[in-house]
């Protein structure tokens, strides 16, 4: 019975002991979680400030990030937001304190020896939050531990460290308030081993190194756990629960004292371990004690259970609060991060527009740090470019809708203007009155400039800066609308430079560009500022003369333009002086008189300009309806001529040229004709103009040359190797860059003909023009040993000097002199005498009568051409004539005589 009783008592004690210990363990586990949450939250809050400062310093301009004043301002502007639990100090890259949020004079104090500086200096912590070991503050003399972050410039250069010393007292107070009774201990330990805070017995514990202890034995095994040991601080055995705080070098430890139950357990084991007698004796003596102890134990259990329940409740509450807090904290954190790190400038003002805060991006934008702006009116930052109306509209919009979005010119600290895209939102108070205005701003100066550039490129001519074709169309439509409203007519003027291609060809494209620019300036100076001058492309310009009150204004302007265009252009610089001469042809059409839509007006002005060109250039022409018909005819002719070339409708006729000394056919002039399917044989006068303006002249000229070369080959074989055919070369062919004389020479070589088998006929006027621009090309023919014949001599103003300069081989006297009777013949005689003096042979053209022939022969004229001898004939006919001439019975002089008779 006694044995049984002892067994029951021992067993009961043992069971209740295990239950109790489990309860204590669970309680400390809950406890430590709650304390961990508290510490973690406080650390994260401080870290948020550190991140904010590190970023604020990072976005400062390089100059300012090294300036103690700026940093001091930056830190002190936040000072008010801290309580005395912690503050922030900035250490420069050498570890010297630069400024502190407390405003304390710590500048110059070195913290280079501190673990939190060294770790960031060698960047071994990779920019993460570092928590330094607890120590006594160098200046404050407080018990502290340290949170720190590395500060880098935007380029990654090490600028220093922001450190937040945390006052350990704060934690101690919290821990003390959390003690349910003196059995409990709460300790915060640094991961490196030193105690940061403890309750109770803080003074003894602070800074004590417990790296070698049961705690760290357990920490090395797991991040959380429970163990029982004797505390070295107050020599109490406790059940300890610990947790390594998430990702931080901090350990939270909570211990519960269970000395008495431990003692009891020890004792019960002693009882069980002794002999029955002793046990029985003990039972008698200790029975009462045991029962007493058991009762006490029950009380203690009850207390523990109450404590346990309370701690569970507290934990639940903390967890519930924690969730709300975490959510708030999360959104606060996000907002703060957003505010601090946003690339967009942010500014918050009160309802009166006084600035309350700005973010670092705003400082970057405006050049002002927050402190310089707080209390100032937001509008002080505007540049003055936007007028009062603009701001009135803006305020009206914000007042009515609470919202405004637009572009606004601001002025930065350096006085430079910049354009921002701004979004303003209103925050209302509980009564619905505006409480705060939040503005988001981004600098769009560059974006705007590049948009403007793109717009300019799309609408303006890059060379002259004038509106281009696109913009011109836009202006034209606007001006037409204006005319519709005002009923004041408008003139559209087309200006095309004459022979501008030659400026490029002779002086080079760069000089051509200079001339075009100068043309633009001169045109703009010829019109009113309200008129539009545009460049359509190449050497084509347009002028819109709007709202004409006086019909004479158009003529006056056209005359002014003609005058300005024909004034010599100085294109070179002082060293390389270049003068260019040019003129222009102008076409004018009136709105609404000549056309109702833009397309018609443009066509009209172009036709009028074309006619001005046809009439000899350097003139202006008003549009007239007949021009439309002329244009239509011209367009048809162009199409037909194109077909003619494809369908072999062009012919060459040859007009013989006679040696007047013996009447022999010694040369022939090749003359092109068009065998038109309905209009019969057409003379060059009827289609060469179109051929020139359409560019077909080059193909036709080439074809004529090759035909003539093939023919001369036959004729030389029939008569003499000195027989020549002359071909006319149009001024257009000379103006063409690709003057293909080299190909022609090659062709002659292929046919085994000497270059002088072909004579190139040029007109006097071409030679005059040539004297300025085309001389190289004319001379090239001569260098290739082709002969030159000057057509229609006497009709122009060709000087003797030209004849020498271009080594003319033949002069063809203009038929007008041959037909003029005695006076004409006197001129012919003079020409012949002069030509002979210069060693030039003379061909008289248009000889129709015997008298003319006699007089010219008497004057010593070398060669003659005209109906008296022969009209232009086909190649076959010419061949026949030459055959006849060369046959033994038909001597040369016979033909001469026959023809002359
Ligand atoms: N320098 C320069 N030349 C240009 C530019 N754009 C076009 N041109 C040249 O301007 C010339 C325009 O020639 P056209 O108007 O056809 O002929 P033109 O020689 O003026 O003769 P007409 O108009 O018949 O009197 C061409 O040779 C183009 O190559 C430019 O921007 N700069």
Image (cartoon, rainbow, N blue to C red):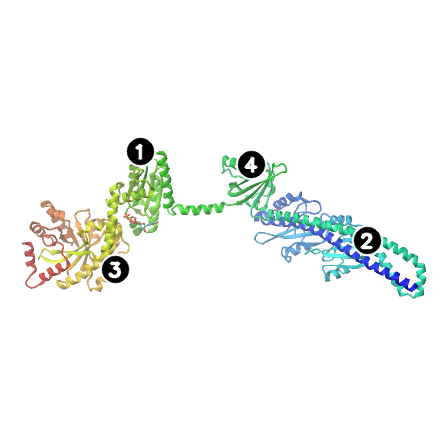
Comparing 351 with 704, the one in front is 351
Instruction: Identify the residue position indicated by label 1 in the image.
Output: 550
Q: Which label lies toward us, 3 or 1?
A: 1
Q: Position of residue 222 (x, y in %)?
A: 72, 61
Sequence-wise, the earlier of marks 2 and 4 is 2
Q: CA distance from mark 4 to mark 1?
A: 52 Å
Q: Which label lies toward us, 4 or 1?
A: 4
Instruction: Identify the residue position indicated by label 3 in the image.
Output: 742
Instruction: Identify the residue position indicated by label 4 in the image.
Output: 399
Sequence-wise, the earlier of marks 2 and 1 is 2
Residue 143 placement, left or right of 398: right
Q: CA distance from mark 3 to mark 4?
A: 82 Å
SS assignment at label 3:
helix
263, above or below 361, in the image = below
Locate residue 16: give its quadrant.
bottom right
Residue 29 placement, left or right of 366: right
Sequence-wise, the earlier of marks 2 and 3 is 2
Look at the numbered discs 4 and 1 and tell me whether their residues touch, using CB distance below 8 Å: no
Q: CA distance from mark 2 to mark 3?
A: 119 Å
Sequence-wise, the earlier of marks 4 and 1 is 4
SS assignment at label 4:
helix
Instruction: Identify the residue position indicated by label 2 in the image.
Output: 304
Q: Position of residue 311 (x, y in %)?
A: 77, 51
Which residue is pictured at 7% across the width and 64% down the height? Answer: 888
């Amino acid at each position: 019975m006694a044995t049984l009783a002892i067994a029951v008592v021992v067993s009961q004690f043992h069971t209740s002991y295990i239950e109790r210990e489990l309860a204590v363990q669970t309680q400390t586990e809950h406890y430590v979680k709650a304390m961990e949450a508290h510490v973690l939250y406080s650390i994260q809050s401080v870290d948020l400030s550190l991140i904010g400062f590190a970023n604020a310093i990072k976005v400062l301009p390089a100059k300012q990030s090294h300036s103690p004043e700026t940093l001091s301002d930056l830190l002190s502007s936040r000072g008010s937001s801290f309580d005395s639990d912690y503050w922030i100090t900035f250490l420069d890259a050498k570890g010297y304190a630069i400024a502190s949020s407390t405003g304390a004079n710590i500048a110059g104090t070195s913290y280079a020896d501190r673990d939190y500086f060294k770790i960031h200096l060698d960047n071994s912590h990779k920019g993460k939050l570092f928590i330094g070991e607890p120590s006594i503050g160098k200046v404050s003399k407080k018990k502290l531990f340290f949170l720190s972050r590395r500060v880098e410039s935007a380029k990654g250069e090490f600028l220093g460290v922001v450190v937040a010393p945390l006052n350990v007292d704060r934690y101690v107070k919290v821990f003390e308030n959390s003690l349910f009774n003196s059995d409990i201990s709460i300790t915060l330990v640094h991961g490196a081993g030193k105690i940061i805070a403890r309750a109770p017995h803080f003074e003894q514990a602070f800074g004590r190194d417990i790296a070698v202890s049961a705690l760290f034995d357990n920490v090395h095994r797991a991040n959380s756990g429970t163990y029982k040991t004797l505390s070295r601080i107050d020599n109490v055995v406790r059940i300890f629960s610990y947790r390594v705080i998430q990702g931080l070098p901090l350990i939270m430890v909570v211990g519960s004292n269970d000395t008495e139950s431990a003692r009891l357990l020890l004792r019960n084991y002693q009882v069980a371990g002794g002999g029955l007698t002793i046990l029985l004796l003990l039972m008698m003596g200790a029975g009462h004690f045991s029962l007493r102890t058991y009762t006490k134990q029950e009380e203690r259990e009850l207390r523990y259970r109450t404590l346990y329940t309370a701690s569970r409740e507290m934990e639940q509450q903390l967890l519930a609060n924690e969730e709300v807090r975490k959510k708030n904290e999360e959104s606060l954190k996000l907002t703060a991060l957003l505010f601090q790190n946003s690339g967009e400038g942010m500014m918050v003002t009160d309802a009166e527009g006084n600035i309350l805060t700005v973010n670092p991006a705003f400082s970057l934008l405006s050049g002002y740090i927050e402190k310089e702006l707080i209390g100032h009116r937001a509008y002080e930052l505007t540049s003055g470019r936007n007028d009062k109306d603009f701001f009135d509209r803006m305020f009206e919009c914000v007042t009515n809708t609470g919202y405004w979005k637009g572009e606004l010119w601001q002025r930065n600290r350096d006085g430079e203007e910049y354009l921002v895209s701004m979004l303003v939102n209103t925050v209302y108070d509980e009564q619905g009155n505006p409480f705060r205005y939040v503005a988001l701003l981004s600098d769009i100066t560059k974006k705007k400039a590049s948009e403007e550039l793109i717009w300019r490129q799309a609408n303006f001519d890059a060379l002259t800066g004038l509106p281009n074709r696109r913009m011109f169309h836009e202006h034209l439509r606007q001006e037409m609308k204006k005319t519709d409203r005002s009923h004041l007519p408008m003139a559209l003027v087309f200006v095309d430079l004459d022979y501008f291609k030659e400026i490029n060809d002779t002086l080079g494209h760069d000089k051509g560009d200079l001339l075009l620019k100068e043309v633009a300036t001169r045109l703009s100076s010829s019109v009113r500022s309200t008129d539009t001058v545009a460049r359509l492309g190449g050497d084509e310009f347009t002028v819109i003369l709007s709202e004409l009150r006086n019909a004479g204004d158009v003529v006056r302007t056209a005359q002014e333009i003609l005058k300005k265009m024909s004034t010599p252009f100085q294109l070179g610089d002082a060293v390389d002086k270049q003068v260019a001469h040019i003129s222009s042809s102008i076409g004018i059409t009136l709105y609404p008189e000549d056309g109702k839509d833009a397309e018609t007006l443009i066509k009209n002005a172009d036709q009028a300009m074309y006619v001005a060109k046809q009439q000899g250039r350097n003139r202006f022409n008003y549009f007239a309806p007949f021009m439309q018909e002329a244009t239509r005819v011209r367009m048809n002719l162009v199409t037909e001529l194109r077909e003619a070339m494809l369908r072999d409708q062009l012919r060459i006729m040859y007009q013989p040229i006679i040696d007047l000394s013996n009447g022999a056919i010694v040369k022939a002039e090749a003359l092109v004709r068009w065998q038109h399917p309905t209009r019969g044989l057409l003379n060059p006068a009827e289609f060469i103009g179109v051929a020139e303006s359409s560019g077909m002249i080059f193909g036709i000229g080439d074809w004529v040359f090759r035909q003539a070369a093939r023919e001369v080959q036959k004729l030389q074989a029939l008569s003499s190797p000195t027989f020549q055919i002359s071909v006319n070369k149009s001024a257009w062919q000379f103006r063409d860059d690709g003057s293909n004389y080299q190909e022609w020479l090659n062709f002659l070589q292929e046919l085994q003909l000497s270059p002088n088998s072909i004579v190139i006929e040029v007109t006097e006027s071409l030679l005059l023009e040539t004297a300025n621009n085309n001389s190289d090309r004319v001379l090239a023919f001569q260098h290739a040993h082709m002969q030159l014949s000057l057509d229609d001599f006497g009709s122009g103003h060709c000087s003797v000097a030209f004849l020498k300069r271009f080594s003319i081989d033949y002069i063809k006297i203009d038929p007008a002199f041959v037909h003029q009777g005695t006076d004409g013949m006197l001129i012919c005689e003079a020409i012949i005498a002069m030509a002979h003096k210069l060693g030039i042979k003379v061909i008289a053209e248009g000889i129709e009568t015997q008298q003319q022939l006699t007089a010219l022969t008497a004057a010593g004229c070398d060669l003659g051409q005209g109906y008296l001898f022969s009209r232009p004939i086909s190649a076959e006919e010419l061949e026949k004539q030459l055959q006849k001439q060369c046959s033994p019975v038909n001597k040369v002089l016979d033909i001469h005589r026959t023809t002359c008779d």
